[in-house]
Image: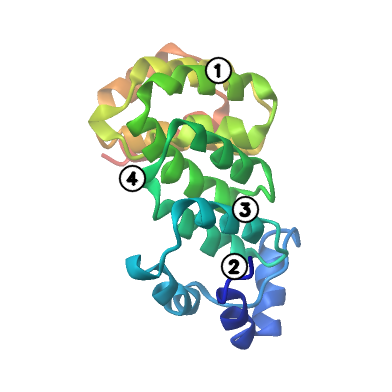
Amino acid sequence: MIHPIIFTFEEFSNPKIAKEQSAYLKNKFLFYGLKTPLRRELQRPFLVKNNLLEKEDAFSMVKELWKASQRELHYFGQEYFFKYAKQFQVSDIELIEYLITHNSWWDTIDFIATKPLSEYFRLYPDERNKIVQQWIESGDIWLQRSAVLFQLKYKAETDLQLLTYIILNLNDSKEFFIKKAIGWILREYSRTDSNWVLEFVNKHTLQPLSKREALKLIQTQ
């Protein structure tokens, strides 16, 4: 299924900006060269409720967009996908996992983890422990980063026991994106309960990057 967004993005492409954007992401992806404000303006009509496809067709389209070369189509695809969050079923974790494990880099992972995945686990909390365990053991750094970050905006609803389990099981990782994610989730939670974060950091030996990130807000108080 070819979505008209492709033709819209192509019409406004800018090769110079595209080259810069690709370089920023280590030349892992091609770009049309659309800066974020323009991309959002161009895609806005397609995200209006009345223009959305039926869920099954929408999810098929999202998967096809994810196979495209241009990164802007991945951005559009994940935002389109998130429009259906209230309709998620248990089995939709399969598409979430597909999006996490294909064309993976921090820019899409952080959106998927903190929005669609976050909402999925709110809807189906009984699925959390099983899936998180599988992802931790997978060896896939993007599944692992997603497991760390899905509670980023949960605030007082954060499952601290689960968060502790995740962090301690990934604490020895040598991957930058895992160490950074651990620090990020702790830093964000310090906005809710800085004492808990400080106690956690003092109790456990985190890697320097994780610890530094975790304490950034606390040290400025």
Q: Foreground: 78 or 31?
A: 78
The amino acid marked with disc number 4 is Lys
Q: Residue at x 64, y 64 (%)?
A: 71
- For label 1, the residue is 133
Q: Earlier in the sequence, mark 2 or mark 3?
A: 3
Label located before the other in sequence (2 or 4): 2
SS label for mark 2: helix
**Amino acid at pointer 2:** Glu
- The residue tagged 3 is 63
Provide residue 142's location: percent of width, then percent of height.
62, 37
Question: Mark 1 near mark 3, Cβ–Cβ under 8 Å?
Answer: no
User: Which residue is labeled 4 in the image?
Assistant: 86
Q: Please indicate, yes or no, whether residue 144 appears anywhere in the rendered image.
A: yes
The residue depicted at 61 percent of the width and 81 percent of the height is: 7
Looking at the image, how many numbered discs can be counted on the residues?
A: 4
Q: Secondary structure at mark 1?
A: helix
Real-space Cα distance between discs 2 and 3?
Answer: 14 Å
Q: Secondary structure at mark 4?
A: helix
Q: Quadrant of the N terminus?
A: bottom right
| Mark 2 vs mark 4, CA separation in Å | 24 Å
